[in-house]
Image (cartoon, helix red, strand yellow):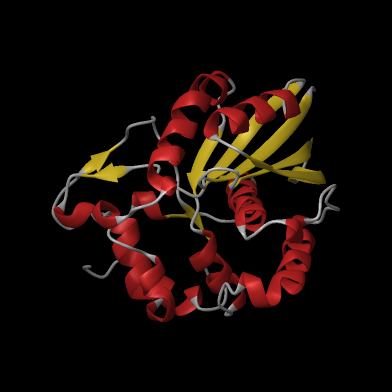
Amino acid sequence: MSRAFVIGYDPGGNDAHGLAVVDVQRSDSGWLTERLRVTTARSVADAIAWLSDACADGTIVAVGVDTLTEWSSSASGFRPADLWLRKTYPAVRNSVMSPNSILSSMTVSGAAFLTLLAPRFRADAAMVTEAHPKVCYYALTGARHTWSADKARMAKWLVDELAVETSGDLTDADDNLFDAGLAALAALRGANREWTLDLHALDAPGGDTRVRFCGPTRFWWPSGIGPTADAETRSDDKL
């Protein structure tokens, strides 16, 4: 088959859009990783252009994005996923803000990225998953996302999790490249069915208020690991 890729994107402001491309190969056990390429783009347009070149000769099989891949018409814009994360991880609950109060390029740039990339991943039937790198890192390691103090250790951890060697230094930028890489890891784990908990599938207590602006997406999350092990038993509680 042609080459295949799993991509991750961490939206930022000017000169701070983190991108990660994991080259993968299909095997009987799922998608096996081969290498990781990372870069920082100046804008959403530059991010799309770089990905178009990086993935020109193959198929995008999964996309992980640190943005809201679904919106909600509920109070404060809270989605079941947001409420579940805040309840499950009280130590880092402040990292899960009310969607209506988020003032950052994460929302606008993330939505623009998904809209511009949609013709490509829909044509390839790629799976799109939302990612929350800061909370996900805590869920997987039990440690806080403290990039400025622990960048060398965190970068090594990510490369080990992906089982690749990176062609670029993850520590060259702020945390944008790391977060993009972790978004790609979430997409990879979901594509390989290693993570089967989909936070977008949680029931909404007030009825379905989902606004799927870019088509069906997932929010794959690690289950039965570290702090999530106890939380998973409570996932059916009313929020």
Q: Residue at x 58, y 68 (%)?
A: 137
- Residue 94 coordinates in the image, percent (x, y): 36, 72
Position of 80 with respect to 209 (left or right) is right
Residue at image coords 15%, 49%: 207
Side of 142 where 99 appears, left or right = left
Q: Residue shown at 71%/43% (left/top)?
A: 39
Residue 186 in view (yes/no): yes
Which corner quadrant holds the C terminus?
bottom left
Q: Nearer the viewer, residue 120 or 127?
A: 120
Residue 148, compared with residue 171, is above or below; it is below
Q: Can residue 234 be seen from the camera position used here?
A: no
Q: Quadrant of residue 212?
A: top left
Q: Residue at x 19, y 45 (%)?
A: 208
Q: Position of residue 31 (x, y in %)?
A: 73, 42
Up the image or down, 98 lies above or below 13; here it is below
Q: Residue furthest front?
A: 14
x, y percent for residue 49: 64, 25
Q: Toward the viewer: 142 or 20?
A: 20
Q: Quadrant of the N terminus?
A: top right
Q: Is residue 29 left or right of residue 52?
A: right
